Image (cartoon, rainbow, N blue to C red):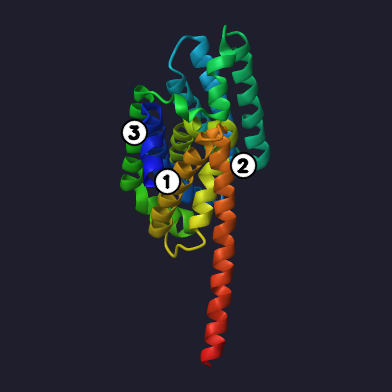
Amino acid sequence: MPDALAELFAYRFMQMALAACLLASVGCGLIGALVVVRRIGFVAGGIAHTVLAGIGVAVFLRGSPVMGAVIAALLSAVLIGWIKLRWRQDEDVLIAAFWSVGMAVGILFMSRTPGYGVDLMSYLFGNILLITTDELVKMALLDAAIVALLLAFHKQIIVSSFDEEFARLRGLHVEAIYILMLCMVALTVVLLIQIVGIILVIALLVLPAAGAAQFATSVARLMALSVLFSMLVTVSGLMLSYQPDLPSGSTIVVLAGVFYVFCVISRALWRRYRKRALAGSL
C-alpha cells in the first residue's frame, strides 16, 4: 500500500492535486464549523451559485476567473447579509433569488464567450487534476485571509453565534460580525470551487464539519476535527477516483456523505454502549 501511494503521488499533477486538497481543507474545516454552528448551509449555497456570475463576467472580459469569483462571492455575501438584516426579507426567498439570478448571469456571459464550454465547466463540477501553481498560490492566500480574520475576530464571532443578545449587551456589532462571517464563507466557497465545483460546494463545506460535530464538545475542537476530517475526505476521495478514472469532485462528495453517516452511526452506538455500561454499573 505505501508503495502504491508513493507511485500515485510521484506524478506532478497528483502532487498539485494533493496540495490543493490540503489547502482547501483548512478553510473548509474552519469555516464549515461556523456554518454548522450557525446553521447557514443554505446561505453558503446561495453565495456559491452566485460565484458563477463573477466567473462568467471575468472570462468574458478576459480577466482572472478566480478574482471574478472572489469579487462575486464577497459582493453576494455582503448583499445577502445586509438585505436580510435591514429589510427583514425571508431568507429562503432572498437566497433563492441570488442563487438563480447568479447562475443565470453567469450562463449568459458564458454563452457570449468563445470556447466557454471547455474551461468554465470545470468551475461548475471541479477539476482538481488541472490545478496550477498559480492557483495553489491563490488558494494559500485565501487560506491566509480566512485564518487571519478568524484570529482577529474569533471571540466576537463565537459569542454572537451562540447568544446575540449577550453580544449586543457587550457592545458588539452583531450585524457587522454576521456579514464578516458570510464574507469568510464566501472566501471558502472560492477555495472549494477547484476541488468539487460550484454545484457540490455546499456538501463539502457542511458534511465534514457535521461529522466532526458528532464528537466535538467545543468550537475549537469542532474546528480542529473538521479540518482533519476534511483532509481525510478530500485526499481519500482523490485517491479513490484516480484508478477507475472517476470525477474527483463527485467522488470526494460521495465519500463525505458516507463519512458523515458513519460518524452519526458511531456516535449513536457509543451513546448506547455508555448507557448500557452505566446501567450495568448500577
Secondary structure type for disc 1: helix
Most extreme residue toward the bottom is 282
Which residue bears the numbered disc 1?
Answer: 231
Q: Is residue 59 left or right of residue 94?
A: left
Q: Nearer the viewer, mark 2 or mark 1?
A: 1
Number of other residues with Cα within 10 Å of mark 2, as a class: few under 14, some 14 to 19, many 20 or more: few
**Relative image position of residue 49 (x, y in whole percent):** 59, 30
* Place of residue 276 in the rendered image (x, y in percent of width and height, measured from the top left): 57, 83
Which numbered circle lies on residue 140?
A: 3
Residues packed near mark 1 inside 10 Å, few (<14), some (14 to 19) or many (20 plus): many
Task: Name the residue carrying label 2.
Answer: 88
Lower position in the chain sequence, tag 2 or tag 1: 2
User: Which residue type does callout 2 highlight?
Assistant: Arg
Q: Which callout, 3 or 1, points to the residue nearer the camera?
A: 1
Would you say the residues marked 2 and 1 are in contact, meaning their CB atoms lie under 8 Å apart?
no
The residue drawn where x is 59% and y is 51% is: 258
Which mark lies nearer to you, 3 or 2? 3
Residue type at numbered disc 3: Ala
Q: Depth check: 253 or 102 in front?
A: 253
Residue 277 or residue 65, whichever sits in front: 277
**How many numbered marks appear?**
3
Give SS at disc 3: helix
Of mark 3 and mark 2, the one earlier in the sequence is 2
In the rendered view, tell whether residue 78 sits above or below residue 106.
Answer: below
**Lateral position of residue 205 relative to residue 117, left or right:** left
> Where residue 50 sits: x, y (%)?
57, 28
Mark pair 2, 1: CA separation: 38 Å
